[in-house]
Image (cartoon, rainbow, N blue to C red):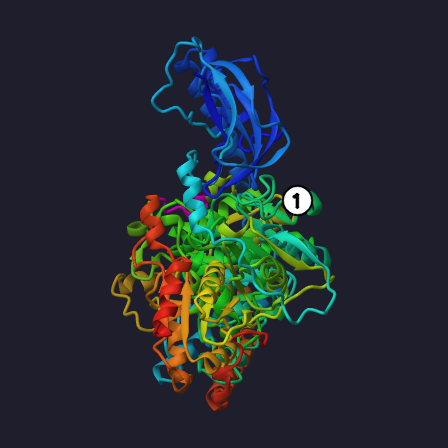
Amino acid sequence: MAIELKMPALSPTMEEGTLAKWLVKAGDEVKSGDILAEIETDKATMEFEAIDEGTIGEILVAEGTEGVKVGTVIATIKGDDDAAAPAPAAAAPAVEQKAAESEAPAGQDAKAKAAAAIAPKSDAKPAADPELPAGTTMVPTTVREALRDAMAEEMRSDDRVFVMGEEVAEYQGAYKVTQGLLEEFGPQRVIDTPITEYGFAGIGAGAAMGGLRPVIEFMTFNFAMQAIDHIINSAAKTNYMSGGQMRCPIVFRGPNGAASRVGAQHSQNYGPWYASVPGLVVIAPYDSADAKGLLRAAIRSEDPVVFLENELVYGRTFDVPQIDDFVLPIGKARIVRPGKDVTIVSYSIGVGFALEAAEQLAAEGIDAEVIDLRTLRPLDKETVLASLAKTNRMVVAEEGFPVCSIASEIIAICMEEGFDHLDAPVLRVCDEDVPLPYAANLEKLALIDAGKIVAAVRKVCYR
Amino acid sequence: MAKSPRPRATASAAKPAARRAAKPAAAAEPIIASDVAEEAAFALRSLQQAHANNKRYDASDEELLKFYEQMVLIRRFEEKAGQLYGLGLIGGFCHLYIGQEAVAVGLQSALKEGHDSVITGYRDHGHMLAYGIDPKVIMAELTGRGAGISRGKGGSMHMFSTDHKFYGGHGIVGAQVPLGAGLAFAHKYRNDGGVCMAYFGDGASNQGQVYETFNMAALWKLPIIFVVENNGYAMGTAVKRGSAETHFYRRGTAFRIPGMDVNGMDVLEVRQAAEVALEYVRAGNGPVLMELKTYRYRGHSMSDPAKYRSREEVQEMRDNHDPIEGAKAELLKRGVTEDKIKEIDKRIRQVVAESADFAETSPEPDVAELYTDVLVETY
């Protein structure tokens, strides 16, 4: 019986990929370690290696095919004694990942399924920004590309802007957010650092004090804990301590929050940490347009900005308005779905879950308004309170720990300034109060999802 | 075909292994190791050698008078600050530079003020005065007044003057080292020919971020001079109790940063060392690590009784190594009159008295200042 070769998952978040090239054809003898094909993920082109010996039977997916789902059978290998040999107990061959990724390699269908379960369903998208001029051309763009475009455009218009971090230049970004920047701007402005977060965060802050506009990429914000002294003590406090004389216009950016199946040390939302510090601006966008417009605003800002991205939404596509100087205001929340019965406040990946929940609730006759905070500091209280005054009920959805969270802050604001408008206690839907577990089932239980938001909304609506 | 993003083995790592494989291991290895060490040692000691060959700066009388004046200004200023602290006019932490004056004056006199950057830790008054910043606004900052250089919102440890390219004044021990490398990065990025001088102490030398910075500064050949002001004590911990390698100038060796061991109690030796280091750095060779052996006469801060050292030790430094007395003796030997020196002393006393008056009489910050300067922009 033939061995089936399946489309491998080559990153923790990969759901599908392009079969770029076959390096073997039917009838070829292969042995363990031979490279069979090249597969493009959204991050990189990877080599797909054989681990079994035999003869290639059939090529089932032609080279150049895009959107091949993880787990699809792409070819078969005939064993030495194909006619007689029984199938091995574990028929699906494992694959090996040749290119080094920053994350642990994934290789099983179950993992890809888990990733799919964590990511919000992509059919629920934010409503178009009402402030855009009518007739604006919209270009479908991934969040990853939008972030790259924002940096590239700011680098073109301001030669003080440079990008620094681990693997940002020659590797093209650990998550490919800086793809192509080295080629366009050269090694003077796109700078690979050693693995030394504390050091390069400090060098970035010093360069900002010296008049440049650094964009410092952390491979993930988990690693920025090594550098948090410079983010807080050097960047955030300088303007105040100097009586407004010395500024630190710097952007610290990178993926934040839970990724997929990478365990507790690589899965934390630092939004509440940074949002608690006066002197910082903290931005956490959800869709591509906000990612682009707000990153450009962040780079232009005279203040230090912590710009929190999310790995799970990097590959998602949203419309970005085709406007030359598309820059969005910092500190303004956005109503991404208008509604009248209840308000769901969220940010970053939580917005996707909130929109998905709102669709389910609509089917039950509950019309939910969804607010994307976009900026966590300064927080747009006015938009939150105005919505509360309209709906009188609120749920805060946050992919992060519940204790001392952005949700806690929103609830405090509602108590202090919106008490008379409350028809029910504000509820928070956050991750469970545990370090994020690795096992797929436990991870799923620990994280927020649309169902948990729906349940909370029913509660505040007394349904 | 996409290249494998990480090469499996670098050429440099592969070569010695191949060589070892070709020859009997026991014979080959020591030869290679000593070759490498010798080469490294040559480059790393070259600046020290240049300094040893010509130790003291050949100052004109006028220059030496200027150095003397600046050192006296720092001494009298700090004595006054100590006095105002005792009267309750200065709060919090206050770290005095008394005894270390020759370091800031000798080094910074070699810099181009307003062009080259200076950054230091919390013991920052002396470096500011040596860079020509008005004593009045420094003293007014110490007393927490609105006219202070940071509008009274920074205090002793947090003072800045971007006009002078003095970038603080940083309270977190060692943080100024990568920040200084960032300033050097900016000089290099703009190709403006500027150099950053980043001061830190023997205590800060044990912070990990210092070595992260050494690595990048050497890797990218940043124009920076790392200055360890070794005053013998990290707060109350004597160097030998806190440092496995007490020769701080050697601590750049692992990063191929040349070191210089300098007597920080003689302003002319300090200045000459600065000349050697600056020539090297300005030529684009990357960083230099200087260790300045110095001594603080006072405690770590005003609240430090300094029980960790003997009176005799302090007195010995004061009597035999004082940088100001040393400069004065040299001036007299050169034939500068006692009157001329007295005239400087008198003038400086006047300047310091005026700064203290200003600091005592100017008003506290307006209460509205509480909320200003948190962010630059309004969102």
B356 or A173: nearer the eye? A173
Indicate the position of residue A14 as horizontal and vertical percent values: 50, 41
The residue carrying mark 1 is A180
Above-or-below relation of B123 to B260: below
Residue at image x 34%, y 81%?
B86
Position of residue A164 in the picture relative to residue A257 (left or right):
right
Indicate the position of residue B178 as horizontal and vertical percent values: 50, 54
Position of residue B160 in the picture relative to residue A115 (left or right):
right
Above-or-below relation of A318 to A194: below
Indicate the position of residue B260 as horizontal and vertical percent values: 50, 46
Dividing the picture into quadrants, the one containing residue B143 is bottom left
Position of residue B117 in the picture relative to residue A227 (left or right):
right
**Residue B121 in view (yes/no):** no
Circle 1: element type:
loop
B216 or B10: nearer the eye? B10
Highlighted range, magenta:
B245-251
